[in-house]
Image (tube, grey):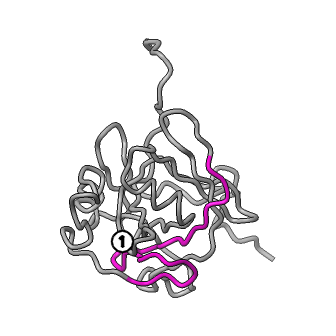
Amino acid sequence: MKEIWKPGNMLYPIPAVLVSTRGRDGKDNLFTVAWTGTVCTDPAMVYISVRKSRYSYKALHETGVFAINLTTEKLARAADYCGVKSGRDHDKWKDCALTKEEAGKIPVSLVSESPVNIECRITEEKDLGSHVMMLAQVLSVHADTAFMDENGRFMLEAAHPVVYSHGTYFSLGKRLGKFGFSVRKKKSGVRKKG
């Protein structure tokens, strides 16, 4: 039996990412976003949704750029901290002992400890009520070569990424199959004679 609830956001789990910004004053900041995702592949586009009251909103709105830094089990504490502390009052880079790495296409610092950093330029802001959705074009992706296999395939699972669900962080579980596994024909292992 299921209960019927009022409309709400129940699309979980979702990624918990560290978003880095730099204000016009040159101050770097980090904040955690769980409302983020892929929008389009060609051109490559993503989005983040941010409350106007967030300290980083001003930097996002004024500069039009940000970086998404994927989080891992090792970055879970930083992801939580950067979601509850404000950059108005704290240097979150210093507090979390994170290393800054200059981005290549935008004037923003990337989190060196993150396995993937995505440089983004905002193309549109949509004020949707409690949050402003920022649609952004992906300008560049930085992938840590420590997570490449012998065939040059990026293995994000080796970095132990985390997701967020109803106020709780989770590490991703076991691999269940690759795209298309449900329709792929199984090899019988029986060789034909002749």
Q: Which residue is mark 1?
A: 28
Task: Give the side of residue 51 with respect to residue 105, left or right.
Answer: left
Residue 84 x %, y %: 25, 49
Q: Is residue 100 part of the magenta span, yes or no?
A: no
**Quadrant assignment, res 136:** bottom right
Task: Give the side of residue 40 with respect to residue 94, left or right.
Answer: right
Residue 16 x %, y %: 39, 54
Q: Is residue 115 part of the magenta span, yes or no?
A: yes
> Residue sitting at 70 percent across and 51 percent down?
183
> Residue sitting at 63 percent across and 74 percent down?
139
Label 1 CA crowd tier, 10 Å (few <14, some 14–19, many 20+): many
Residue 173 visible in the snapshot? no
> Which quarter of the rendering shows the N terminus?
top left
Q: Nearer the viewer, residue 191 or 157?
A: 157
Label 1 residue SS: strand
Region of the chain picked out in magenta, as a range = 101-125
Q: Is residue 104 above or below residue 5?
A: below
Residue 75 x %, y %: 28, 65
